[in-house]
Amino acid sequence: MELKQDFIPQSNSNRPQTALRPTHITVHETANTSNGANAEMHARYVKGADAQARQVSWHVTVDDTQAIQHLPFNEVGWHAGANGNRQSIGIEICVNRDGNFPQARANAISLVRRLMNELSIGINSVVTHQHWTGKNCPANLLPSWNEFITDVREGTSPEPAPPMEGRLLRVIVDSLWVYNRPDWNARYTTVSRNEVFTIAEQLTVNGSRMYRLKSGLYITANPSYVQLI
Ligand SMILES: [Zn+2]
């Protein structure tokens, strides 16, 4: 993933140009779920009047497609309280509802790994905003923060599942059970070859994949029985 540079102008008050020797990386989420609140939008925001009035700035925003750097890594930003600011690089992960958060998380992991490598920062110094100030940030990642750290350490991130909602499937056997609960014992009725259904989501039930359909019923996701169209 590319790291674009779009720096806050030196004349802006939220770019104090205070020297930074970063020993930590602080992970945040933007907490802005609005449509379009992606890295591009935050790059505009952090250069604008509101960010100066609120005295906020940070180093990189990452979304599901790119990362944009707003400050050089040897300058302090204002994102994590006095202690956090003078020791750390601040990364904001986008949570816009029209974005793919698992992909933004995966991009954040590769960004953190790259910065650790370039700036010689160890895994124990990758911390949350909460670590510095107690704020509930990054809100989505905090409940499974250890998993995030493990994924950073191992350089692996589970491949985000492709979005299934709205995809169509066709039955490719003569007769197939559908279920009225996400339970392989909850047989409800049968459907026939060439019937087409709209998928609402994919689930795993007792280790086997199942689709919940828009109709509210459930069907196997096994490609021997159904085909995505
Ligand atoms: Zn934060």
Image: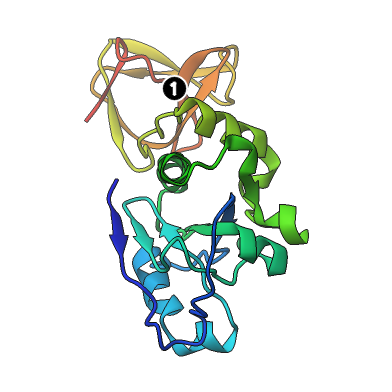
140 relative to 207 in the view: left or right: right
Whether residue 135 is visible to the viewer of this picture, yes or no, is no
With respect to residue 159, does 118 lie above or below?
below
Where residue 184 appears, as percent x and y from the top left, is 56, 13
Of 79 and 50, which appears nearest the observer?
79
With respect to residue 139, does 82 lie above or below?
below
Whether residue 164 is visible to the viewer of this picture, yes or no, is yes
Of 32 and 206, which appears nearest the observer?
32
The amino acid type of the residue labelled 1 equals Ile
With respect to residue 227, does 199 lie above or below?
below
54 relative to 34 in the view: left or right: right
Q: Secondary structure at mark 1?
A: strand
The residue that appears at 54% across and 70% down in the rendered structure is: 77
Question: Looking at the image, in which quadrant does ligand 1 appear?
Answer: bottom right
Of 171 and 144, which appears nearest the observer?
144
Where residue 201 appears, as percent x and y from the top left, is 45, 36
Number of numbered discs on residues: 1
The residue that appears at 54% across and 42% down in the rendered structure is: 121
Colour setting? rainbow
Disc 1: CA contacts within 10 A as few (<14), some (14-19) or many (>=20): many
Where residue 62 appears, as percent x and y from the top left, is 41, 55
Q: Residue furthest right?
A: 134
Q: Identify residue for label 1.
A: 219
Where residue 138 appears, as percent x and y from the top left, is 62, 54
Q: Is mark 1 within 8 Å of ligand 1?
A: no
**Quadrant placement of the N terminus:** top left
The residue that appears at 46% across and 48% down in the rendered structure is: 101
The residue that appears at 63% across and 64% down in the rendered structure is: 86
Of 74 and 229, which appears nearest the observer?
74
7 relative to 138 in the view: left or right: left
**Quadrant placement of the C terminus:** top left
